[in-house]
Every structure is written in C-alpha cells, then in structure tokens.
Image (spheres, helix red, strand yellow):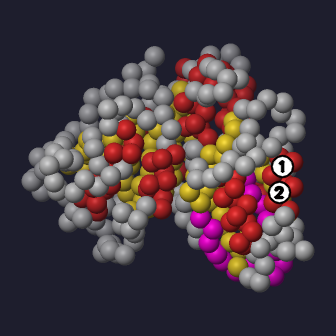
Amino acid sequence: MEDDEEEPPLAVQIDEEIKHPTQPPPNDDVSVGVTVITGYLGSGKSTLVNHILNSQHGKRIAVILNEFGEEIGVERAMINEGDGNGGAVVEEWVELANGCICCTVKHSLVQALEQLVQRKERLDHILLETTGLANPAPLASILWLDDQLESSVKLDSIITVVDAKNLQFQLSERRNSSSFPEAFFQIAFADVVILNKVDLVSPEGSGGVLEELEKEIHNINSLASIIRSVRCQVDLPKILNCRAYEATHAAHLEELLEENRSLSTKDLHDSGVRTLCICEPRQVDLDKVRFWLEEILWDKKYGMDVYRCKGVLSVQNSDQLHTLQAVREIYEIVPARKWKGEENQMNKIVFIGHNLNEDVLNDSFRTCTTS
C-alpha cells in the first residue's frame, strides 16, 4: 500500500531571495480562496499536497496543516485567541523553493488565516489539509460565512481524496447502521472527489470496477466532479479556483442542476446517504422558502438530515435568478443574475443527506409557491 507520508518538499531559508515568475499587481480587494483537503488516512492527501508544492505552477500557494486533535476539537480551532497567552498559533512558516509556504496549526485556524493574508507577499491560494477531522462540515461553515474572517479569505471548494482500492470496503462499513463511516461524510461534502490509486485496482475488468466506484460516489453526491489519478497527479486548474461557494458563479451550478434534474430516490429502498433533486415550475415566495428551509435544516422537522443543498430559485416579483446553498444549518440565498428571456424559470434544488424523503420535500416545497 502506498505510504501517505512522503519526504517533505525542498525548503529554503526564509530570508533567502527567491525569484518568482512575474505576476500582475495584486488586487487587495480580492479574497484569497481556501481549498479544504480531506480524506481517509492513507488515501493520498499528503501526496496531493506534495504534488502541489513541488509543481512549478508560478503561483504562491500557502499550505496549512491543521492538526485537529481530540484534546482541541473543532470549536476551539475556530476561535481567534488573539495575542494573549494561548501560545504560538503558527509554529513555523517554511518557504519553499517554488514560492509556496507551509505551516502547521494546532490551535486557532482563524488567526492563522489572518496572519497569512496579512503577509507582505500576495497569496494566490490557500490549501488546508485536515487531520483528525472526520466531518468537514463545521470547518466549511466557518470558512464560508464567518464574520471573523470578513472578506479576506473565501471558501473555494472541498476536495476529498479516496483510495480506489479500499473505498468499497470503507463504504460498506456500518452501511445500514445509524452512524456512517467517515467516507460517507467526506464524499457528501465534497465538490471534487479525487479517485486516487486507480493503478492498484485489479487490471482484470478494472474499468468496470472504477465505473462502479464512480457510480457509488455519485449515488452519495451527484454534484461532485470525479478525477481519476495515480499518486494524486492532477491538473491544478481542476482543483483550484473552483468557486463552488461563490453565489455569482451561477453557470456551473445551473449546469449541475440540469444534469441532476431527473435524479430520484424512489428506486432506492434503504435510508442511506444519497442525493436527490426536486423541481417546481411556479414562482416562490422568498420568505416562505426561508421558513421552509429553516424547518428542514434547523428543526429537522421531517426527520431528514441534510448535509449539503444547492439550488436555483424563481422568486416572486423578481427578475433575478437566485442561488441557494446550504452546509448543514448554514444557508445563503442571493440574487445571482437576471433571468434570460428564453429561459425556463424553474426552481431546482439538490439535496445531499441521510433519510431524505422525495415526496415530503416536493409536497412541502409546493407550499412556498405564490399561486
């Protein structure tokens, strides 16, 4: 089995002059994107990070290794502990030969991010590799709509690295129990899934095996794009600047929703983690939609556990297409662009979660319509 721990990339003295490719003048008003990298131990997370750090891509990318241990917990990691007696937040910054920088954070992630964006050299992107954290949802919520970070950083996407050889076993663990193995959560919250170590799958009929794995991944999260890889050798444009949480980046979301429009769970007979899509042609009352969504996300009114939610809304008395995004209890509905004259102004919402009931979602959403 491939060892997830690799030799660290070549580092240089922090005060040594480093020649970087010529970049255009930085725009201080532009937020720096943060990509969260998650996955099982041994799936290849560190391999992916090392691939990025060793590549000559001409970008200044910061990598934060966030060690969430049981003794710290996510909640404390999200708190800005200031300059008090909490100890050094960032133990050490290491600058690499290609201009990227690395650090390990054990306590306040928020403060570490603030330190990063305040550095003299403009960053192009931030990678956050999580360890000891099975469920990326709390982290995503903080990075997405957290007031502490203001507009200096923004959540770009969540990338989950999975091991093609062991994924089926990991998904089969406690599949029908009330709790789910880490792999379900990590795939459910992902915007991109890297199906790594495809070379270790048996050559005999391997194509069929990989297709089955991709089908399994899409059954859990049909919104995620899947990239096959060997030792996480992937093209950086496919995993950086995805803009998955950017409300104004509606085109990609609309494309995903159109692909998922016919998605139904009526042929599935268990209560596992899955994706489903609901559609409604009539315009909706925005206040009613907010109330409906809060009952589902906050009150668990219908006994459903929603992990992710994405959609487009046709709102009463508005010529704007509104986008809807939710991660657990946190949601956002914003106008993204004007509807085009020839467009079918259809409400489409994709849910990813546990115990989803398509009939209940459809019937309850109809109460939000204006007719």
Q: Residues within 10 Å of mark 1 (few under 14, many from 20)?
A: few
Q: Is residue 155 above or below residue 2?
A: below
Which sits in the foreground, 337 or 7? Answer: 337
Amino acid type of the residue that numbered disc 2 sits on in the rendered structure = Ser
Amino acid type of the residue that numbered disc 1 sits on in the rendered structure = Val
Q: Is residue 134 magenta?
A: no
Give the percent coordinates (x, y) of residue 80.
Answer: 29, 55
Give the residue at x 48% y 47%. 138
Give the percent coordinates (x, y) of residue 169.
Answer: 61, 19
Residue reaching furthest left?
15
Q: Circle 2 — which element?
A: helix
Q: CA distance from mark 1 to mark 2?
A: 6 Å
Residue corresponding to mark 2: 364
Q: Is residue 244 above or below residue 306?
A: below
Residue 150 falls in which quadrant of the image?
bottom left
Which sits in the foreground, 249 or 171? Answer: 171
Q: In this picture, which residue range is highlighted in magenta?
A: 332-351
Give the percent coordinates (x, y) of residue 32.
Answer: 38, 63
Give the residue at x 66% y 27%. 178
Give the percent coordinates (x, y) of residue 233.
Answer: 46, 38
Q: Is residue 189 above or below residue 343?
A: above
User: Which mark is drawn over residue 287?
Assistant: none
- Contact (Cβ within 8 Å) of mark 1 with mark 2: yes
Give the residue at x 84% y 78%. 342
Task: Answer whether residue 37 is visible to the viewer in this image.
Answer: yes
Give the residue at x 39% y 42%. 74
Residue 303 falls in which quadrant of the image?
top right
Residue corresponding to mark 1: 360
Which sits in the foreground, 186 or 142? Answer: 142
Residue 114 relative to residue 129: left or right: left
Q: Residues within 10 Å of mark 2 (few under 14, many from 20)?
A: some
